[in-house]
Amino acid sequence: MIDRLARFVALPSLSRQESALADAVCAELRAAGLPVQREANNVWCEIGDAQRPRLLLNSHLDTVPPGHGWSQDPWTPRIVDGWLVGLGANDAKGCVAALIEAVLATQRRLNAGQQLGGTVVLALTAEEEVSGAGLAAILSRLAPLDAAIVGEPTGLVPMIAQRGLLILRGVARGRSGHPANTPAASADNAIATAVQDLARLGEFDWGPMHPLLGCCHAHVTQIHGGIARNVIPDECEFYLDIRTTPGESHLELYERLRSFLRSELHIRSERLVPVETSASEPIVQAALRARPGAQPAGSPAMSDMVFLQGIPSVKIGPGDSRRSHTPDEFITQRELADGAAAYERVIWEYCGATGDHARPPVAAATSAEGGTR
């Protein structure tokens, strides 16, 4: 697996530039005798008994661009003391390598005569980092799906809830004037209005506390106002990045914010909604049996889980999300091995020998702790 991952890391695959890596993945799966399909830079195949339940295993091929601070070329993989360092090693090519290993191991068991009692759909997709034409673009071709595993670096903690993203554009309006006039004059400073509104966000009721994700929260990410240093501005624009929870719809939250602030608010993006899977779902129970002692948690980070609305899903994978998008990103050989073993166990725990999911449920966590551990 470490060699496979090194080959993958050595192939640059920035979002919308995953073609070379998709070629390599196709070649590896075909060499193993698996029937591969491809659309653009999305690659998938199926193994199993061609029956329900159908379990999706998904992770992404693309990476973000390398930031500053890398000690060496980010696309030249280095293996040092069991660590593989390189761009995408942790997010999420390690998950890709481990998922492939789990599928190949499952296929070997099928070839030896074991009965899976279901179908595994492996989909390694593009443009996750930009929420582009990746998993969502091919989801209809993978249907029907009964459950999904989304490969992201979670330290193999099963994540069953994920925050959404609501982006709002705010516009504070005023009346221009000359700065020589006193504040009591006719001018109305739009920047001052915006600042007052942004300060009031600390008083806003962000809704109920989610047991795994906590409350919604917002950050001001951009602000611009004024046309000249000697003109009181009549307009100030700002953007709010709001990380949402399943307790309230984006539209409901937007309407409450709009009535709370003096500035105009406009929805810039609302499609990335929060996701939650019940702890009683068979795929969650399978993940917990595959990871004895693990407890379900919530993830603050976005992933392609957002496109699996209505399909019970668990985000889980080797690595640590705190390493993602950082210089000298890495994953360990031990993490890879544990990840592949966990994925293989989830496959068999979920599908089982007959596809029977009637086992008693594993107790779910009630802790409010969220985030990757």
Image: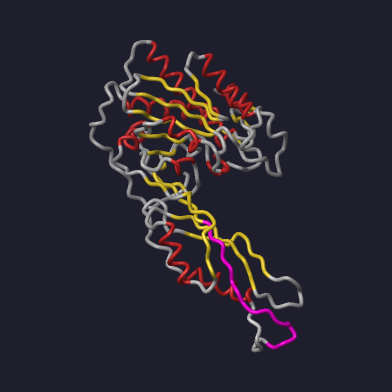
368 over 257 or under it: above or below? above
* Residue drawn at 46 percent across, 19 percent down: 104
- Which contiguous range is marked in magenta? 167-182
Q: Tell me if 124 is positioned left or right of 364 in this view.
A: right
Q: Tell me if 107 is positioned left or right of 237 in this view.
A: left
* Residue drawn at 28 percent across, 38 percent down: 362
Q: Tell me if 350 is positioned left or right of 152 in this view.
A: left
Which quadrant is the N terminus positioned in? top right
Q: Tell me if 60 is positioned left or right of 316 in this view.
A: right
Measured as percent of width and height from the top left, residue 120 is found at 39, 25
Q: Nearer the viewer, residue 238 or 345?
A: 238
Quarter where residue 222 is shown = bottom right
Asked if residue 220 is among those painted magenta in the image, a careful observer would answer: no
* Residue drawn at 53 percent across, 63 percent down: 266
174 over 146 or under it: above or below? below
* Residue drawn at 33 percent across, 23 percent down: 118
